[in-house]
Image (cartoon, rainbow, N blue to C red):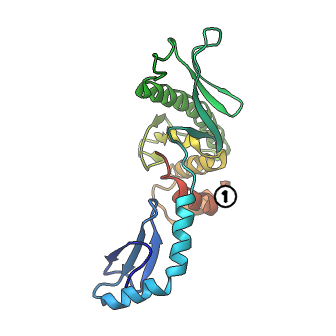
Amino acid sequence: MNFPFEYLHKTNKRSKSLKLSIDQGGKVVVTSPKYTPKFVVTQFVKNNEEWIVKAIEKANQTKKFDSTTHLFIFGKKYQKEVIFSETKKFGIYVMGDKLIFNPLTPPNKSNIINEKKFQTKIDNFLKNTASHYIVKRTHELGEKMKLNFKNITLRKQKTRWGSCSNQKNLNFNWRLVHFDTIIIDYVIIHELSHLVHMDHSKNFWELVRKYDPEYLNHRGWLKRNGLNLD
């Protein structure tokens, strides 16, 4: 049977029924109990074809938070531009809806700038911007939750947004800077709550809910969109 899409079939001995999902890359994944006949899986996909097509379209339309032409800072979209000017300050700065890089020297005759150098400058700018917000906000929320921690570290990580160690040290992914502050606050509250509960027990989620009543929406948003970083 031909479908207008490809899908990956996985088996899971713990599964009790057939399940459908769309991963962050827009790929269809079908999970079934072990020993499920192939024709049953195929029919299941056929019965859900309309939903799958719509889900793929939605996944493909999801915005990218950082690309070669633009990026998001605290949920707002900015166009990347390189503009050499001897009269304006050197480096990265925001002007309206643009993120401008003014290099020390003008681009060469082909108007080409070193992309690696440009990206390094942007990364440093984003890390500093993230640090200013996350460090201050973590102290504010820690005080509100009456919780003490030791150190805050910011790193660039691909999928992990935060962590809390047994020594009460907090780590945050500085790429959170791309997201709206309500999402960043959810991650901070999540990690602060681990200072009390180092697991994801019911008590842990109750503590998260106390300081972020909409945590389920924020958690779901992060799962759906958090990997859309180029």
Task: Judge whether residue 195 can be spotted in this image.
Answer: yes
Q: Is residue 145 above or below residue 14?
A: above
Secondary element under disc 1, as helix, strand or loop, is helix
Evaluate whether residue 202 shows in this view. Answer: no
Q: Is 88 rendered above or below residue 18? A: above
Q: Residue 82, relative to residue 212: is it above or below?
A: above
Q: Left or right? Give the position of 212 relative to 114.
A: right
Residue 66 position in % (x across, y down) = 52, 42
Count of marks overlaid on the render: 1
- Please give the name of the residue rendered at 44% of the width and 59% of the height, measured from the top-left corner: 25
Instruction: Please provide percent x and percent y for residue 213.
Output: 68, 60
- Looking at the picture, how far across and down is residue 60, in whole percent? 52, 60
Which residue is outermost to the top?
A: 86
Residue beneath the point at 35% across and 80% down: 14
Quadrant in the picture for the N terminus: bottom left
User: Closer to the camera, 123 or 46?
Assistant: 46
Percent x, y of residue 65: 55, 45
Residue at the spot 46% in from the left edge and 63% down from the top edge: 26
Q: Nearer the viewer, residue 96 or 213?
A: 96
Question: Counting other residues with Cα less than 10 Å from the Cα at mark 1, is it few (<14), some (14-19), or many (20 or more)?
Answer: few
Residue type for callout 1? Lys
Q: Residue at x 43, y 87 (%)?
A: 44
Residue holding disc 1: 210
Name the quadrant containing residue 72: top right
Residue at far right of view: 96
Query: Image check: 55 left or right of 5?
Result: right
Q: In the image, is residue 9 above or below residue 116?
A: below
**Viewer-side residue, 55 vs 177:** 55
Toward the left, the furthest residue is 35
In the rendered structure, the answer to whether residue 112 lies left or right of residue 207 reads left
Q: Quadrant of residue 117?
A: top left
